[in-house]
Image (spheres, helix red, strand yellow):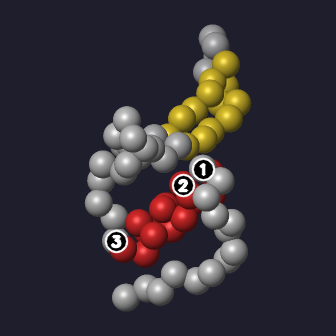
C-alpha cells in the first residue's frame, strides 16, 4: 500500500511511504505460496527470530 501524509487545510504533501503485507496463520505460517528460494529465506528468518539459528549469509540456490 502507498501512503501520503498531508497537512490540512492546504493538503501540502509532508511525506510518502509504502508497506508490504503478508498473511500469517495463528502459528506464524505463511498462508500464501512463494517460490522455494523465498520460502527457505522466510523459514531461516523465522528460525533466527525464534533463536533457533544464526543468519550466516549462506546462499540459497535459485532454480
* Residue closest to the eye, 27 or 21: 27
Residue 8's x, y, as percent? 64, 13
Residue 40's x, y, as percent? 45, 70
Residue corresponding to mark 3? 35
Q: Which mark is residue 50?
A: 1
* Residue closest to the eye, 33 or 47: 47
Q: Is residue 35 above or below residue 3?
A: below
Disc 2 element: helix
53 left or right, relative to 38: right
Residue corresponding to mark 2? 46
Q: Is residue 54 above or below residue 49?
A: below
Which quarter of the figure is the N terminus placed in? top left
Label 1 to label 3, Cα distance in Å? 23 Å
Give the mark toward the camera: 1 or 3.
Answer: 1
Residue 36's x, y, as percent? 36, 74
Residue 48's x, y, as percent? 63, 58
- Mark found first going from the N terminus, 3 or 2: 3
* Residue at 43% across, 75% down: 37
Mark 1 touches mark 3? (CB < 8 Å) = no
* Residue closest to the eye, 51 or 2: 51
Disc 1 element: loop
* Residue at 69% across, 74% down: 56
Amino acid at each position: 500500500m502507498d501512503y501520503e501524509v498531508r497537512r490540512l487545510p492546504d493538503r501540502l504533501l509532508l511525506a510518502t511511504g509504502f508497506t508490504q503485507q503478508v498473511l500469517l496463520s495463528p502459528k506464524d505460517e505463511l498462508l500464501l505460496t512463494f517460490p522455494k528460494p523465498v520460502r527457505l529465506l522466510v523459514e531461516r528468518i523465522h528460525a533466527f527470530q525464534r533463536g533457533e539459528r544464526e543468519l550466516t549469509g549462506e546462499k540459497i540456490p535459485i532454480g
